[in-house]
Amino acid sequence: INYEDLRRFYTAANGDFVVFLSSIKKTIKWRETYRILSPEELETWANMVFWHGYDLMHRPCLIVRLGLACSCLPSHDRPRFAQAIISQVEHGIMYLVSPENPEVTVLVDCEGLSPFKIPMQVMRSCSSLLQDHYPNRLGCLFVIRLPPVVRVIAQTFIQVLKPTTRKKLKIGGETYRKILLENLQTLPSYLGGDCRCTKCLNIGMDVKRPRMDQLNKLQTNEGVSDSEDTSELDLICQDDIDPSWSYDQVLRTAIIGLLMFWVLIAVMAGLSDPEFQSQ
């Protein structure tokens, strides 16, 4: 923890020295017990969470394929997915960010994510860890290919956010490529870009889930739970709301979509500024 880290923690504590000291002690204790995955171990997750290029402000871009992970991984492996996200953030901050601009950009790809089966435990875990131990690190958050119902709700509630927070959050619908091309130096090939880097060539369009023998080698500790929220709803995922749905189904979809959107916002708050965290 260097001087710049201390300054970020102090800013996140709004200048309250007691809160600042408590958060530093909490982070030191967390770092003593939480296991950050090595670069070799992260290769197991390279098709689901990986760094790819920079945005136009030269902030490294972390790609999180949330929809793919949720559609491929059994529930007992999802905590390790969260561990991979935290580990990639750690490696990115250690080796990719520049002293002039210590922030990162995050792109969350929700393709394949059902609004009825949301990995709440994974998202809560990431949100809590990022907020506690990586304050003031987010430069921009892109959320693309959300289910239609959630996207409509998201666009509505974005309007109530403060301007500084709203500027960091970008929701991409059918025009997500245009939004990404306007903000990223290089677009991954699986999202329609012409990048031919090793990562893009390895990912392809048909992604296999991480090899289970490798996953089983990853050791977890008390900082990573192997349990998944058993209250997740397992209902049908559709591209749009079917006209034949009942009022109760539509209402339930809207409520679940709203919860998902605000959890995504919480993830952003974990890396964002104290102005947002006070909302």
Image (cartoon, rainbow, N blue to C red):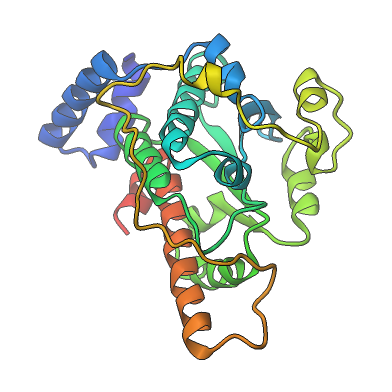
What is the x, y in percent for residue 197? 81, 21
Residue drawn at (59%, 71%) of the image: 149
In the displayed structure, 241 sits above or below 220; it is: below
Left or right: residue 222 compared with residue 65: left
Viewed as shown, does residue 130 lie left or right of 177? left
Residue 221 in sight in this render = yes
Quadrant of the rendered image containing residue 66: top right
Instruction: Give residue 274's position: percent from left, percent from top.
Output: 33, 46
Q: Percent position (x, y) of residue 246?
A: 54, 89
Q: In the rendering, at what x and y percent does residue 173 appear?
A: 71, 61
Which residue is outermost to the right? 194
On the question of residue 162 being in view, the answer is: no
Q: Quadrant of the N terminus?
A: top left
- Of 23 and 197, nearer the camera is 197
Q: Residue at x 40, y 38 (%)?
A: 126
In the image, residue 40 above or below residue 130 = above
The quadrant of the image that shows the C terminus is bottom left
Is 5 above or below relative to 67?
above
Q: Quadrant of residue 20?
A: top left
Q: Residue furthest left?
A: 18
Asked if residue 118 lies left or right of residue 44, the reply is: left
Q: Is residue 64 above or below residue 278?
A: above
Q: Nearer the viewer, residue 47 or 5?
A: 47
Please name the residue shown 63% across and 59% down the image.
146
**Count of numbered marks:** 0
Residue farthest to the front, as pictured = 213
